[in-house]
Amino acid sequence: MAAGEETSHILSGLTAQLPDRDPEETAEWIESLDALIAEQGTERAQYIMRSLLQRAGARSVGVPMVTTTDYVNTIPVDQEAPFPGNEEFERRYRAYMRWNAAVMVHRAQRSDIGVGGHISTYAGAATLYEVGFNHFFRGKDHPSGGDQVFFQGHASPGMYARAFMEGRLTEEDLDGFRQEKSKAGHALSSYPHPRLMPDFWEFPTVSMGIGPMNAIYQAQSNRYLQNRGIKDTTDQQVWAFLGDGEMDEPESRGLLQLAANENLDNLNFVINCNLQRLDGPVRGNGKIMQELEAFFRGAGWNVIKVVWGREWDSLLENDADGALVKIMNETPDGDYQTYKAESGGFVREHFFGKSPQTKDMVADLNDEQIWGLKRGGHDYRKVYAAYKAATEFKGKPTVILAKTVKGYGLGPHFEGRNATHQMKKLTMEDLKAFRDHLRIPITDEQLDADLYRPPYYHPGMDAPEIKYLMERRAELGGFVPERRRTHTPVTLPEAKSYEVAKRGSGKQQAATTMAFVRLLKDLMRDKNFGARFVPVVPDESRTFGMDAFFPTAKIYNPKGQNYLSVDRDLVLAYKESPAGQLIHPGINEAGAVAAFTAAGTAYATHGEPLVPIYVFYSMFGFQRTGDSFWAAADQMTRGFIIGATAGRTTLTGEGLQHADGHSPILASTNPAVRTYDPAYGYEIGHIIRHGLEQMYGETSDDKNVMYYLTVYNEPITQPAEPDNLDINGLLKGIYHLADAPEATTGNGNRPTANILASGVSVPWALEAQKILNDDWGVAATVWSVTSWNELRRDGLDAEEHAFLNPGQPARTPFITEQLAGTTGPVIAVSDYMKAVPDQIRQFIPNDFASLGADGFGFSDTRQAARRYFKNDTHSIVAKTL
């Protein structure tokens, strides 16, 4: 193993692999640098070092990239911004919040409730949040428009505790933690859930990894709004609070390059490095802060480490030979965790005792003073300096790596323990020690009265520290978090914008994907609303025929197009622009859903409605990013999800992983998604129009919905809209499409049947109808099922109503009502697995059979695939007979 490789994850090796042929000269260079720092400070020294490295590169002197720095604070003491607040006041009410947060979770653990909760995360991160609340997080009434803060999910008790101090929540509310139905009206959701607390939380974060992605695209969306002239977001910041264990999620790191590529200096990650996952150390044998420093720096981010509190400053200043820094660099995280679970004497022996020099450095300190050497994430001054530097840094996003102790201040049973994340209850000994540590004026008698009902504490709104707290929030623009629903009034597209969908394709053939794209193009031309559409396409625009948008709408790129396009001579050449309307995330479905979410919630985040239209390969939608769509539902995203090239048999050559036969089933698990499988362009027109009215119409009963439409790549003759179209049935999920043809012979007393078909299978049903009539004398009525999912929801709602109202007449499900009076069997067919049409089976009294495409897809012709799955025209005929 080459020298340095063993510790490369801890500290970049600059000299370890090279011999020092002239130590005396080396010492002179180092002495010169030390003198420069002493006389002119670290800022000048940084410039000189950067200049030397630049010159070394120009002269072909190989200097390895410094991906990690010493395990010390990034900001030198002489460059720390002075702390402007009243630290004593802030310390006081921060203690009250830490107490109330822990008590809230503890009280919810009494035997008659036991709903869970997390005590330790906020206890360790309170300083990180409070510095932000008191000096950085701007509310929606700030002239800037306010910041967006993604709170770490497991720290939610701390946000409730602060809202209690602010007078926004009562003791009764705190006692409703995690009891959202039994304590309705005074209930708090377990984590940041906007859908459950729509006036409080803005961003859901507890499905780990989604928060970082969404924060990055929120920062991009802010710039998008700015560059398109919709809203001035120049002075708005995005903050994302994350855990170091959470950074192992691929999603947490997978989109960092976007933030760097687009110079999103409005974005700040704050990673709470308590060195612990949920059940143990993050990197027991390594150093997660060093690993993350290297990763973020390599991704093009500005990195600020906050490792040690102010108590370490004098020790580091006196570390003339670097012995202390060497120990800091070489000590693995597993040991650092152990130190905080032990004692000052243990730290003296096992940490400082590693070298004679460091042991002497603390000889004059007693064990209590050694124990009081805080980590940087618990020091107001260090955290403030880092936040100020982050918000002032230009050209790159910033990540702050702040070292903390999980369960800080909760006592020896909690601090730094592997099990601390799962520990919900405090013993009486823990409570009293925690009270003493925080100096909360609560007596032993009050605690002894009931172990499971220790009192909350609030000094009153007239207390000087609370007045100070409220003044800080007023100056920063109001409370955070807060979600507002009011937005700029909008005028929906005019009726003429939908005409292209009604006309059909005439003598030409067009797939429903193309019918949709033509409709969208006209909608985007609408003078009142068109600019609010945000097409989001992950690198498949040409596949879907959306390259027609390039020349006019253009692709969003904050830097414009600074190259000569290879297809510049084409009519549909690739065009990028800072004012571009299309979001083009590349081969990146996760990023596309994050962009969709940011745009689809701009009505609340910024008060500016945008309507994202996310178009993707159908198979790569809910299957790949279902968790992100779930978070989008929680955030109450509004928009359209278009699963293009849908179905299991339409992609003739693509094969197994491209053949979608189950997306409607996956979508049915998301209560906010309304799923449609239209067959014709005019159906798409009505569904889109209805969706826009649902999201932004004045009479809508539920605006927070996402419409999922599956569209196909198989060309068919698109009929014009029928004069007598049952629009209500179309929108509810089923309408009568075609009566059986007149009997060719006899008196017309023929066997009857009903063929229910959706999407691409409707033309097969019409062909089967003709064969049944001409060859078999069977009169089959064809129904277009635009939504199996919505029909099922309606049916289940009818059953629920009957269950809850046994004395009232039962409501008839819509599908049952539509088929009332029909005779003969019902044959349901689609290009999806049979479970999709089977959703309505229980609501149909007729004999019922379903045809679909169960199993894996494969490569072959469409006809061969349909014959294999037995959902083609002749299979419909055979099953009907």
Image (cartoon, grey):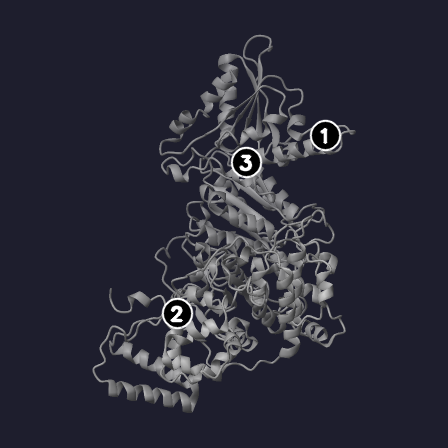
**Could you tell me residue 117's position as x and y percent?**
61, 55
Give the camera-side residue of 639 and 210: 210
Q: Is residue 308 above or below residue 419?
A: below
Q: Earlier in the sequence, mark 2 or mark 3?
A: 2
Residue 269: percent from the left, percent from the top?
50, 65
* Callout 1 crowding tier (Cα within 10 Å): few <14, some 14–19, many ≥20: some
Query: Given this view, does label 2 or label 1 mark the residue nearer the observer?
Result: 2
Residue 473 in picture, x, y percent from top left: 67, 71
> Is there any visible trace of residue 143 in the rendered image?
no
Mark 3–mark 1 distance (CA, rounded to whole Å): 27 Å
In the image, residue 227 lies at what x, y percent?
A: 53, 64
Q: Amino acid at mark 3?
A: Pro
In the image, what residue type sits under mark 1?
A: Arg
Above or below, comparing residue 51 to residue 270 in the picture:
below
- Marks 2 and 1, how far apart at CA: 69 Å
- Determine which residue is flagged by label 3: 678
Q: In terms of secondary structure, where does tag 3 sit? A: loop
- Local SS, label 1: loop
The amino acid pointed to by label 2 is: Thr
Image mark for residue 208: none
Farthest residue to the bottom: give it: 39
Callout 2: SS: loop
Q: Nearer the viewer, mark 3 or mark 1?
A: 1
Q: Which quadrant: the N terminus? A: bottom left
Tell me if 122 is positioned left or right of 857 in this view.
Answer: right
Q: Which mark is residue 811?
A: 1
Q: Give neighbour class at mark 3: few <14, some 14-19, many 20+ (Cα, 10 Å).
A: many
* Nearer the observer, 16 or 361: 361
- Lower position in the chain sequence, tag 2 or tag 1: 2
Q: Gap in Å between the C-alphas at discs 2 and 3?
A: 62 Å
